Image (cartoon, rainbow, N blue to C red):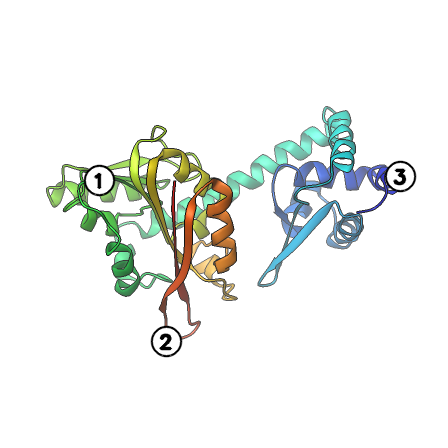
Amino acid sequence: MNAPWDILKTLSDPTRLRLLALLAREELSVAELQEILGMGQSRISSQLAQLRQAGLVSDRREGKNAFYSLRRALPPKPAALLQAAIDTVAELPALQDDHDNLDRILQKRRRVSEQYFNLIAGRLGKNYCPGRSWEAIGHLALRITPAIVIADLGAGEGLISQLLAQRAQQVWCIDNSPRMVEVGTALAKKNGLANLAYKLGDIENVPLPDASVDLAILSQALHHAQHPQAAVAEAYRILRPGGQILVLDLNEHQFAKARELYADVWLGFKESALHQFLKRAGFVKVAVAAVAHETTEPFFETLLASGVK
């Protein structure tokens, strides 16, 4: 981290300050920053490089894409300088335009995901889906306790929930695709599962009360979340004390086409990342292990993470 005087000089550039104001709200790719600011890639990349050198932003790569975000846990003085600078220019027209353009980009992200899942609703279980295997589902099902209240977050049509509802007290399926909710509700009615209910909602803002369920499941859903940590925190919120979270998701991979083919936001997660998500949310007895390995390219591996509130 540079000295405060150097950070002040870094913040004196309008473009760099606009970038920081955006990254303070959301992790963004270079392409998204280009669209928001209406600037060329070379100019934005150059300014991001200076911000990274100053220790104000961090980056990560997924396939061919680079994503930038405000550096986590900035020291108090640099953090105060940065916040003061952002607050000072927040009402300027250029910053207001940036704010509106960022909202438009985030809405576009959500539309892409929703359009994909609306398109495949009714046939999700009939086509290939990364990490969706009976082997992995079996590992999850073995950990189920009968006669409890379950929340299946990002449930899709509710393949797992249709099985769990045979013995559970109540199962709530949460999904942000209206078509998925419609199809799932019809399936529950067809199968006579009165204790299986579907709700339209986002896994980062779950439409269930605090401390209302015994088990929260995120099965191949977390890599579709814009903010995985927020989704895990929501699972923690809705769980009763002693309740459990189970997360089935892909191990980190480099199959970038998953973004186009399956509307994936993240290319899986490292075991350490899943472990951190659960620990930061407040879970204890956290464990993460590989439970399935696909034998054909791109050789997806499925992880099972668990924790207790």
Disc 3 versus disc 2: distance between alpha carbons?
Answer: 55 Å
Give the mark nearest the N terminus, 3 or 1.
Answer: 3
Label drawn at residue 148:
1
Q: Is residue 23 above or below residue 163?
A: above
Disc 1 versus disc 2: distance between alpha carbons?
Answer: 35 Å
The answer to whether the residues at label 3 and label 2 have Cβ atoms under 8 Å apart is no
Residue 265 can be seen, yes or no: no
Kind of residue indicated by mark 2:
Thr
Kind of residue indicated by mark 3:
Trp
Q: Label 2: which residue?
A: 295
Query: In percent of the image, x 66 and y 38: which residue is there?
Result: 24
Q: x, y percentage for residue 198? A: 26, 37
Lateral position of residue 276 relative to residue 78, left or right: left
Lateral position of residue 295 relative to residue 125, left or right: right
Give the mark nearest the N terminus, 3 or 2.
Answer: 3
Query: In percent of the image, x 42 and y 57: which residue is there?
Result: 288
Label drawn at residue 297:
none
Rendered-image quadrant of the C terminus: top left
Mark 1: secondary structure: loop
Dot 2, how many residues are within 10 Å of its Cα: few (below 14), some (14-19), or many (20+)? few
Kind of residue indicated by mark 1:
Ile
Q: Is residue 64 above or below residue 295?
A: above
Q: Nearer the viewer, residue 65 or 249?
A: 249
In front: label 3 or label 2: 3
The answer to whether the residues at label 1 and label 2 have Cβ atoms under 8 Å apart is no
Label drawn at residue 5:
3
Query: In percent of the image, x 49 and y 62: which residue is there?
Result: 252
Q: x, y percentage for residue 56? A: 74, 45
